[in-house]
């Protein structure tokens, strides 16, 4: 049956864990060309800029034996030149899978509803699930497990933060979100994660409290793509949540520091921290490749 990956919770707990295992196996085979997508084309639609997502998908697709198509908004004009329904039906006749990065999450849900091939969310304003799969793979590599880890997410309650909450809905860990009332994550996603009762979830205004004894300290830009006009106001609101060595003094001494990148160095994170000995940001970036290959393998298996 065709399935999609629009949010972390589209996979159940055992599927999420199998995906991490597969990603780690695929990482050992890095550079080998496999047959999983042989004869298949994957459409990669981008309505926002990207380094990691675009390149890791394109490389991952070719390492799985497939072919990728990079499509910007100039060509398809999703829902403008023609309906999302018609785009979904037409693309499904040509390609075996669609990865999409766009603004509206609802548009991606609509695409998935009508497409006959799997859809992967490469980031929307609401969520960034591929990122969090790569991040948890990175935590497993560095800390041996995700279960029970104290993860402190500091800063804007954005798409990346929402996907952390989705992960906490299916996996058991201690997620502390250090943010302001004005920059809270999506309420529905937060309520669902709390109701699931799988993880301990705390929202803390005090960044020092969020970081106390944390194993993982995570941040992202304060103003996401499409919100750069709010950069100044978000920076004023969130300046206390900057990840710097003073703040990290309260963390577990063997903590790791993560950032999905791109970073605005000197704003949400200092150079000394992102370039310091606890930082695993480039392992995280590399793991986008392996995590997404694993997601594509799973979706291909289920669809066949
Ligand atoms: N982390 C991430 O998704 O990076 P890009 O925006 O460069 O794809
Ligand atoms: N929250 C950021 C993530 C970038 C990968 C954004 O949406 O711009």
Image (cartoon, grey):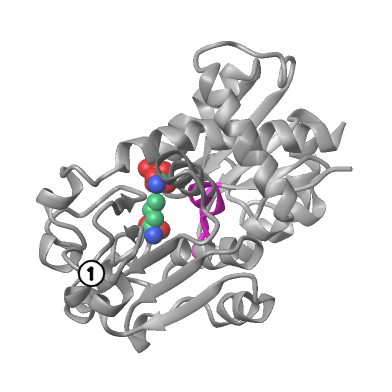
* Image: magenta residue range: 122-132
Above-or-below relation of 176 to 244: below
Q: Front-most of 132 and 127? A: 132
Residue at left offset 45%, top offset 38%: 141
Q: Estimate the x, y position of residue 96 in percent, counting from the top left.
A: 75, 30
Q: Estimate the x, y position of residue 207 in percent, counting from the top left.
A: 26, 77
Above-or-below relation of 87 to 235: above
Q: Estimate the x, y position of residue 177 in percent, counting from the top left.
A: 40, 74
Residues packed near mark 1 inside 10 Å, few (<14), some (14 to 19) or many (20 plus)? some
Residue at left offset 50%, top offset 60%: 103
Q: Is residue 140 left or right of residue 278?
A: right
The N terminus lies in quadrant: top right
Farthest residue, direction top: 32
**Residue located beneath label 1 in the image:** 231
Residue at left offset 68%, top offset 75%: 196
Q: Is residue 15 left or right of residue 122?
A: right
Q: Is residue 51 left or right of residue 149?
A: left
Residue at left offset 83%, top offset 38%: 302
Above-or-below relation of 286 to 172: above
Q: Is residue 218 left or right of residue 54?
A: left
Q: Front-most of 161 and 99? A: 161
């Amino acid at each position: 049956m065709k399935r999609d990956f629009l949010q972390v919770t589209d996979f159940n707990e055992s599927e999420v864990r199998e995906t991490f295992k597969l990603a780690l196996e695929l990482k050992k085979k890095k550079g080998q060309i496999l047959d999983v997508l042989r004869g298949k084309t994957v459409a990669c639609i981008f309505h926002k800029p990207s380094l990691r997502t675009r390149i890791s998908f394109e490389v991952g697709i070719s390492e799985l034996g497939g072919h990728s198509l990079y499509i910007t908004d100039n060509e398809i004009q999703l829902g403008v030149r023609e309906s999302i329904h018609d785009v979904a039906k037409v693309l499904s006749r040509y390609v075996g899978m669609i990865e999409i990065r766009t603004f509206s999450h609802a548009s991606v849900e609509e695409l998935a509803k009508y497409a006959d091939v799997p859809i992967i969310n490469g980031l929307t304003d609401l969520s960034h699930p591929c990122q969090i799969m790569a991040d948890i793979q990175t935590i497993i590599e560095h800390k041996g497990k995700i279960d029970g880890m104290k993860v402190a997410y500091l800063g804007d309650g954005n798409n990346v933060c929402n996907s952390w909450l989705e992960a906490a809905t299916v996996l058991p860990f201690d997620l502390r979100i250090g943010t302001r009332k004005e920059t809270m994550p999506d309420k529905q996603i937060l309520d669902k994660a709390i109701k699931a009762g799988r993880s301990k979830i705390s929202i803390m205004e005090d960044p020092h409290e969020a970081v106390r004894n944390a194993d993982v300290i995570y941040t992202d830009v304060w103003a996401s793509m499409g919100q750069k006009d709010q950069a100044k106001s978000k920076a004023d609101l969130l300046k206390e949540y900057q990840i710097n060595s003073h703040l990290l003094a309260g963390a577990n001494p063997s903590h790791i520091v993560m950032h999905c990148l791109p970073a605005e160095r000197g704003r949400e994170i200092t150079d000394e921290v992102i370039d310091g000995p606890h930082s695993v940001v480039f392992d995280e970036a590399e793991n986008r490749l392996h995590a997404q290959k694993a997601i594509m393998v799973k979706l291909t298996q289920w669809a066949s």
